[in-house]
Image (tube, helix red, strand yellow):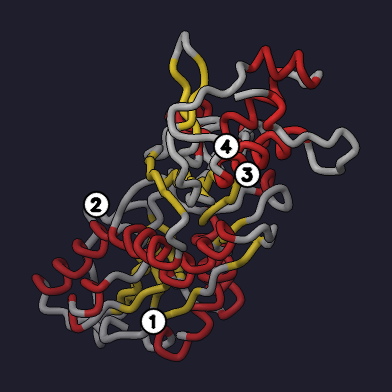
Amino acid sequence: MSQKILNIDRDSPESKYRQIVNSVLDSVASGDLSVGDQLPSVNDLCKAWGYSRDTVLNAYAELKSIGVLKAIPGKGYYIESTQANITHKVLLLFDELNPFKEELYNSFLTALGNDTFVDIYFHHFNRKVFDSLLSENNGLYTTYVVMPAKFTGTAALLQSLKGRVIVLDQLPNDLAGLFPAVYQNFENDTYQSLLSGRELISKYNKLIMVYPGGKEPEGQFKGFMRFSQEEGVPFELISDLNNRQVTRGECYIVIWDRDLVKVVKASQEANIEIGRDVGIISYNDTPLKQVVANGVTTISTDFVAMGKTLAQLVMSKKRNQVQNPSSLIVRGSL
């Protein structure tokens, strides 16, 4: 390929990097470039147009990310495909996979267009894994959707990514306003959900939250504390259910499903009727919770809506930070 095929306008307001990308795509569309054709080396383009290496490398990285270009070590860059129909190549970095995250993922994929490719990774709340996955894949995707969990100090890394960044689920304070996001307001969601169910909660003598801490959002217990204190509800905050006997008149809010199982099992073994003698509220709705213990009441964001909103942000250039809707889903356990 000759540099002359590149349609570069030095006076254009369009960035140099974007002109390189669009020129290659136009040449592919017109038939001037075919599969197997070699592109100029990075050094050749820099000399011909006075560009920096970063400008050319960024352009070639985007062309690779949409499947048009491939790099052969020691030989150069070649056209890999003339089907430049992948507009978005997305790296989706989840903290972990569980039933409700799977619902979010499926909703996201369903709402995407056919011109989008998605790779999913997991950091499992390990900061080193989070950093290395993003660093190793820098420049290989057009969009990076990340769940930063409770990590702090990630702004510099995310800003260094050669592609669009969208924050998902938890939105740490140091990222607020920097990137588009679909997030949960855990404190307000918990507070408003409990407020909507206060009549049902009022029939119990004490409200108990089992909050393990660690990876869990602090907004969950803050919303619980705010509700309990403002409404004058007797409450207790505990980290686990070890050696605790479930008694009548208590209402449990459980974060982890394993604690949900413990409360249900302990109630059944003590012949305590769930929903009358003891109340249970769980986090994050799943189909199974619709049938367990005559239906488990949940505080849950709408994961289907979250997936759809995320897809809309990926396919648009909007920089919205969208708070995802959440509610108390009342069932027999309350």
According to the picture, the residue beneath numbered tag 4 turns out to be 32
Residue type marked 3: Asp
Q: Earlier in the sequence, mark 2 or mark 1?
A: 2
Dots 2, 1 in contact, CB < 8 A: no
According to the picture, the residue beneath numbered tag 2 turns out to be 242
Q: Earlier in the sequence, mark 3 or mark 1?
A: 3
Horizontally, is 59 left or right of 12 in the view? left
Dots 3, 2 in contact, CB < 8 A: no
In the rendered view of the protein, which quadrant contains the C terminus?
bottom left
* Image quadrant in which you'd find residue 202: bottom left
Q: Compute the Cα span from label 2 to label 1.
A: 27 Å
**Element assignment for label 4:** loop
Q: Compute the Cα span from label 3 to label 1.
A: 52 Å
User: Which residue is painted at 45% across and 91% down in the image?
Assistant: 199
Above-or-below relation of 14 to 80:
below
Q: Earlier in the sequence, mark 3 or mark 4?
A: 3
